[in-house]
Image: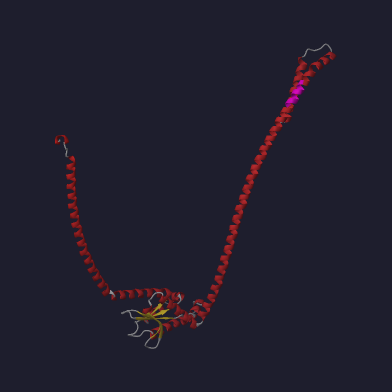
C-alpha cells in the first residue's frame, strides 16, 4: 500500500515539473533558460517536497495506526479462538476421560461378573461330577429317584393323603402310597432308574442286543411293580412306575411303543417328572372334590342358618321401613302446621293499623 502511494506521488511530481517546463516562455539562450527554470522551479520543488513529506508522514501514521488496530483485532480474535479451542479441548478431554472411566468401570464390572460366573461354573462342574458319581452307583441312583419322587409328592399332595416307604400286607415296601378316596383307592408309586443300558443304547442305537437288554430291564421293573404293589382289596387295580429322567421316558414312548403297550397290559403306568406332576394334580382335584362332598351337610346347615338370618333381616327391614314411613307422615304434618303458622304471621304483618282513628 505504501509503495503504491509513493509511486503515485513521484509520478504526480514529475507531471508537475514537465507541465511547468512546457508552459513557461522559452528564453533567448540556454543559460538564461536554465537560470529562469532554477528560479521558478526551486521554490515549487521545495513546496511540493514539503507537502509530499507531510502527506507521507500522515499516511505513515495512519498506516501505522491502522496496522496497530488490525494487529490488536487479530490478537483479540486469536485470543478468543485460542480460548474456544482450549475450552473445546478441555471438554473433549473431559468427555474422553469420562468415557474411558466408564469403559474401564464396565470392564472391571464385567471381569467381576466373569469371575463370579467362573466360580459358579466350577461349582456346577463339581455338582455335575458329584451327580455323575451318584448316577454311576446303582444304589445311589435309586436314592436319587426316590428323593425326586418325594419332592414332587410333597409339593402337590397334603401329608395326610400319602405315605412314604409304606409297607403293604405282603411285607413289600413301596416308595410311596397315595391314599386316594374310593372308588380310586390307594395307588402305589415306585421309582426305577434304568440308566446303564439306556446309555449303551444312546451310544449304539442300532445295536439290537443292547436294545433288547434295555427292553428287558424295563419289563423287569414293570413285572416287579405289578406283582408286588397291586393287591386286590388293598390297593388300586393299577400302579405307577416313576422314571426320574425325561429323556428315558421320551425314548420309550418314541422308539419303543411295545413297552408302553406291555405296561398298559400289566396295569402299570409309566410316568416321568412332568407326567407324574399332571397325575398328582388330577389326584389333588379328586381329593378336593371328595372333601367338598363330605362337607355338603355343613354347607347346607350354614345355608339354612343364612336363610334364617336373612328372614330376620327382612323383618327388621320392614319394621324400619314402616317407622320411616310414619316419621315421614309426622314430618309432613309438622310441615303443614309450620306453613299455616307462617301464613298467619304474614297476614298479621299485612294488617294496617290506623292510629289516628284510634285516638
Task: Give the quarter of the image for residue 263.
Answer: bottom left
* Residue projecting furthest to the bottom: 170
Residue at point 18% right, 52% down? 334
Residue 334 is left or right of residue 294, and the answer is left
Residue 53 is left or right of residue 262, and the answer is right
Percent from the top left, x then y, of residue 161? Answer: 36, 79
Residue at point 66% right, 42% down? 79
Residue 51 drawn above or below residue 125:
above
Quarter of the image with the C terminus is top left
Answer whether residue 49 is magenta in the image: yes
- Residue 208: in sight, yes or no? no
Residue 79 drawn above or below residue 230:
above
- Residue 280: in sight, yes or no? yes
Asked whether 227 or 293 is in front, the reply is 293
Query: What's the magenta region?
Result: 47-55
Mainly helix, strand or loop, the magenta region?
helix
Residue at point 62% right, 52% down? 93
Percent from the top left, x then y, of residue 80? Answer: 64, 42
Task: Give the quarter of the image for residue 165.
Answer: bottom left
* Residue projecting furthest to the right: 31
Amino acid at each position: 500500500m505504501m509503495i503504491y502511494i509513493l509511486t503515485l506521488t513521484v509520478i504526480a511530481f514529475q507531471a508537475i515539473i514537465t507541465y511547468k517546463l512546457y508552459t513557461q516562455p522559452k528564453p533567448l539562450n540556454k543559460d538564461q533558460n536554465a537560470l529562469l527554470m532554477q528560479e521558478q522551479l526551486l521554490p515549487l520543488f521545495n513546496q511540493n517536497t514539503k507537502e509530499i513529506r507531510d502527506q507521507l508522514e500522515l499516511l505513515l501514521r495512519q498506516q501505522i495506526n491502522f496496522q496497530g488496530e488490525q494487529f490488536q483485532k487479530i490478537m483479540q480474535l486469536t485470543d478468543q479462538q485460542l480460548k474456544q479451542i482450549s475450552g473445546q479441548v478441555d471438554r473433549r478431554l473431559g468427555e474422553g476421560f469420562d468415557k474411558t472411566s466408564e469403559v474401564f468401570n464396565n470392564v472391571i464390572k464385567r471381569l467381576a461378573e466373569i469371575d463370579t460366573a467362573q466360580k459358579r461354573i466350577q461349582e456346577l462342574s463339581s455338582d455335575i461330577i458329584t451327580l455323575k458319581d451318584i448316577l454311576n452307583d446303582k444304589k445311589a441312583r435309586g436314592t436319587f429317584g426316590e428323593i425326586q419322587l418325594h419332592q414332587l409328592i410333597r409339593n402337590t399332595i397334603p401329608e395326610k393323603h400319602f405315605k412314604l416307604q409304606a409297607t403293604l400286607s405282603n411285607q413289600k415296601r413301596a416308595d410311596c402310597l397315595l391314599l386316594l378316596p374310593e372308588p380310586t383307592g390307594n395307588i402305589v408309586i415306585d421309582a426305577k432308574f434304568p440308566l446303564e443300558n439306556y446309555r449303551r443304547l444312546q451310544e449304539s442305537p442300532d445295536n439290537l442286543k443292547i436294545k433288547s437288554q434295555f427292553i428287558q430291564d424295563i419289563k423287569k421293573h414293570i413285572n416287579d411293580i405289578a406283582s408286588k404293589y397291586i393287591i386286590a382289596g388293598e390297593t388300586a387295580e393299577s400302579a405307577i412306575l416313576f422314571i426320574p429322567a425325561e429323556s428315558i421316558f421320551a425314548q420309550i414312548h418314541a422308539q419303543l411303543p411295545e413297552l408302553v403297550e406291555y405296561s398298559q397290559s400289566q396295569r402299570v403306568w409309566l410316568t416321568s417328572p412332568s407326567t407324574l406332576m399332571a397325575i398328582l394334580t388330577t389326584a389333588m382335584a379328586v381329593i378336593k372334590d371328595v372333601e367338598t362332598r363330605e362337607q355338603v351337610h355343613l354347607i347346607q346347615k350354614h345355608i339354612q342358618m343364612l336363610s334364617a338370618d336373612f328372614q330376620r333381616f327382612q323383618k327388621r327391614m320392614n319394621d324400619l321401613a314402616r317407622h320411616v314411613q310414619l316419621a315421614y307422615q309426622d314430618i309432613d304434618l309438622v310441615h303443614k302446621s309450620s306453613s299455616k303458622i307462617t301464613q298467619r304471621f304474614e297476614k298479621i304483618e299485612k294488617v294496617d293499623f290506623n292510629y289516628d282513628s284510634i285516638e
